[in-house]
């Protein structure tokens, strides 16, 4: 789960990382009060889930109320890098003396956190590593011991962070590491970490991605999760659902199976209405919820493809029960199913009351058939 900058900064604050004075708005009516509270000059920052907002015109500066209002009006509701701006973070403008970079990211190759420090903050870190490779250092951290103070100091010194700033940077990096660990983060980043002209250290930008599978143990972070249709469907029926806009409904067990079936349907000239990975959710209310969603997409045919690890006859019974509970459903349904007790499973499906059912063995044959039955294809 990616957090917005203002959310990342709320978390930073809890961990003792200083952030600029600021407020979030989703309505221009609040601008007057916010300008009053924060003072001038100020920064207006589009809240979108991507970096590089500065270059793309998503970050504006204002030294008068009129300018602030005009910029906020332009940004709120606009699109930056293809993303709709629904919220603005209004912050005091910092007098920047120095900009540094701190990042911690989960390194899959090492199965460990990697800490990244650079004395060249404020620019894209990929560019820094190409253009100033000696100004950036990475270190894999042993998860059992955690980041040690001496390691943080060594990193700060070796990247060329000014001597008088090292203590401050180390303190922030240690706090950031605690945050990364305690919040089950996959990535956290401060770019730029600013030293102001009067020597204060402040996180001017913030990124925080939390491991979605760990959200259950962080109720305070879970409230940041947007209640999209996909999230609600996953929570309520344990289905991974993605709308794809076509007219062939897909139900599959496992993400790999789902992707393979989508490929086959597209290769046969069809357009999938959705991706649906049911998994164990199908043994609960997954089929009913999935069929309901597929019908709402206006699908012209459905393909159910399963390779079950457990008993496929149990899954077949659940499938038949769901199909029979939708009297309005009349479109062709193609089934291909393999797994433990598959003969019994096929028998259960063949015996169901649904008239427009077609059972096939091969995936590609099933895909060609569903495309044909939908009245599509080559
Ligand atoms: P990003 O482009 O999405 O990474 O957004 P940032 O929050 O990093 O803002 C882009 C750039 O604007 C930063 O790298 C800073 O150089 C600059 N910036 C952001 N906030 C301030 C501020 O308060 N004062 C000044 N002078 N510059 C700022
Ligand atoms: Mn930034």
Image: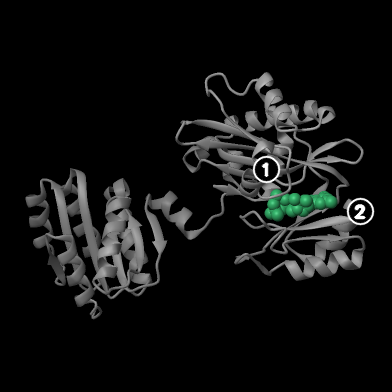
- Can you tell which quarter of the image residue 286 is in? bottom left
What residue appears at the point 12 percent right and 52 percent down from the top-left corner? 345
Residue 303: image x %, image y %? 23, 65
Describe the colour scheme in one phrase: one colour
Q: Which of 178 and 309 lies nearest the eye of the viewer?
A: 178
SS of the residue under disc 1 = loop
Mark nearest the camera among 1 and 2 is 1
Residue 270: image x %, image y %? 28, 73
Residue contact between numbered discs 1 and 2, judged by CB atoms under 8 Å: no
Q: Is residue 16 visible?
A: yes
Q: Which of 150 and 69 lies nearest the eye of the viewer?
A: 150
Q: Mark 1 points at which residue?
A: 132
Q: Residues within 10 Å of mark 2 (few under 14, many from 20)?
A: some
Calculate the distance from the C-alpha at mark 1 to the C-alpha at mark 2.
37 Å
Residue 72: image x %, image y %? 79, 65
- Can you tell which quarter of the image residue 99 is in? top right
What residue appears at the point 92 percent right and 38 percent down from the top-left corner? 198
Q: How many numbered markers are drawn?
A: 2
In the depicted structure, whether residue 256 falls above or below residue 274: above
Label 2 beta carbon less than 8 Å to ligand 1: no
What residue appears at the point 86 percent right and 36 percent down from the top-left corner? 200
What residue appears at the point 30 percent right and 46 percent down from the top-left corner? 280
Q: Which of marks 1 and 2 is nearer the N terminus?
A: 2
Q: Which of 312 and 322 lies nearest the eye of the viewer?
A: 312
Q: Name the residue under label 2.
A: 39
Q: In this view, does 210 lie to the left or right of 372?
A: right
In the depicted structure, whether residue 58 falls above or below residue 9: below
């Amino acid at each position: 789960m990616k957090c917005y900058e203002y959310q990342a900064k709320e978390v930073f604050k809890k961990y003792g990382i200083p952030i600029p004075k600021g407020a979030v708005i989703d309505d221009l009516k609040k601008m007057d009060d916010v300008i009053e509270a924060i003072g001038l000059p100020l920064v207006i920052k589009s809240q979108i889930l991507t970096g590089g907002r500065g270059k793309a015109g998503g970050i504006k500066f204002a030294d008068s109320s009129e300018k602030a209002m005009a910029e906020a009006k332009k940004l709120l509701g606009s699109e930056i890098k293809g993303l709709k701006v629904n919220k603005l973070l209004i912050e005091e403008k910092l007098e920047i003396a120095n900009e540094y970079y701190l990042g911690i990211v989960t390194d899959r190759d090492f199965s460990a956190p990697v800490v990244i420090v650079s004395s060249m903050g404020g620019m894209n870190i990929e560019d820094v590593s190409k253009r100033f490779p000696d100004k950036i250092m990475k270190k894999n951290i042993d998860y059992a011991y955690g980041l040690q103070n001496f390691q943080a100091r060594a990193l700060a010194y070796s990247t060329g962070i000014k001597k008088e700033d090292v203590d401050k940077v180390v303190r922030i990096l240690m706090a950031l590491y605690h945050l990364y660990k305690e919040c089950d983060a996959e990535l956290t980043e401060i770019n730029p970490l600013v030293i102001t002209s009067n020597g204060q250290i402040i996180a001017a930008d913030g990124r925080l991605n939390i491991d979605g599978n760990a959200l259950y143990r962080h109720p305070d972070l879970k409230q940041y999760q947007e209640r999209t249709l996909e999230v609600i469907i996953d929570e309520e029926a344990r289905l991974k659902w993605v709308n794809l806009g076509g007219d062939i409904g897909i139900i599959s067990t496992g993400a790999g199976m789902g992707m393979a079936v989508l490929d086959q349907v597209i290769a046969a000239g069809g357009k999938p209405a959705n991706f649906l990975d049911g998994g164990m959710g199908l043994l609960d209310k997954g089929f009913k919820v999935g069929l309901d969603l597929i019908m709402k997409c206006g699908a012209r045919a459905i393909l159910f493809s399963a390779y079950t690890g457990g008993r496929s006859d149990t899954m077949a019974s659940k499938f038949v029960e769901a199909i029979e509970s939708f009297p309005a459903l009349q479109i062709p349904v193609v089934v291909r199913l393999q797994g433990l007790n598959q003969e019994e499973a096929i028998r259960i499906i063949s015996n169901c009351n649904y008239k427009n059912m077609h059972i096939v063995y091969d995936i590609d044959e099933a895909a060609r058939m569903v495309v044909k039955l939908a009245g599509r294809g080559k």
